[in-house]
Image (tube, grey):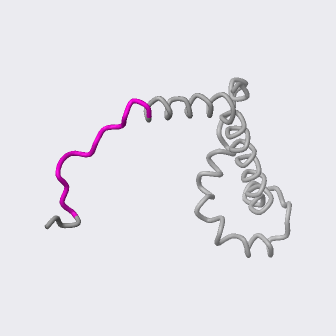
Amino acid sequence: MRQLGDSKGPPHPKSRGRKVRDAAKGVLYGMAAHGHVTAALRTRMYLEHLFMFITLGDMLGVPVIPPYYSLKILPYAVPNIKSWKQRVFRERDFTDQVF
């Protein structure tokens, strides 16, 4: 009797039809959805920057919100502070605006 973990041989490779279907899905994704996905991710990045700036702007010397609310949100934002500071203080060039 065969055990659950036993197998008779190596797993079967993908069939040709499956490879063609996967390639077609990739092409359609690239043509239809890739631009929308990257725009959504870029918008999310800008909103996260704005959120961090509003809640922790006093670290940069910009008192935007009273510290009481910032202290309530601080435990959720602590893991992102170091990378956020690096992104904000990063030296920028005009080529950063080019996609």
Q: Is residue 15 magenta?
A: yes
Q: Quadrant of residue 82?
A: bottom right
Quadrant location of the N terminus in the rendered image: bottom left
Number of numbered markers: 0
Magenta-span inclusion, residue 13: yes
Residue in the picture at 63% in, 58% down: 81
Q: Is 28 placed above or below 44 here?
A: above
Splitting the image into 4 quarters, where does residue 79 fall? bottom right
In the depicted view, which residue is nearer to us: 99 or 4? 4
Residue drawn at point x = 59 percent, y = 51 percent = 83
Q: Residue at x 76, y 70 (%)?
A: 70
Q: Look at the picture and state if 65 lies above or below 30.
A: below
| Camera-side residue of 21 and 79 | 21
> Where is residue 43 drawn, in percent x and y?
75, 45
Q: What x and y, as percent, mark residue 2? A: 16, 64
Vertical placement of residue 65 versus 95, above or below: below
Prevailing secondary structure of the magenta residues: loop
Residue at image position (72%, 49%) is: 44
Q: Write down the region rendered in magenta.
A: 5-17
Q: Picture coordinates of residue 85 (x, y %)?
A: 65, 51
Q: Residue 45 vs residue 14: left or right?
A: right
Q: Name the image quarter holding the C terminus.
A: top right
Q: Is residue 53 above or below residue 73?
A: above
Q: Would residue 75 be found to the left or right of residue 39 on screen?
A: left
In this view, the residue farthest toward the left is 1
Q: Image quadrant of residue 56? A: bottom right
In the image shown, does 35 or 50 lie closer to the viewer? 35
Q: Nearer the viewer, residue 30 or 4?
A: 4
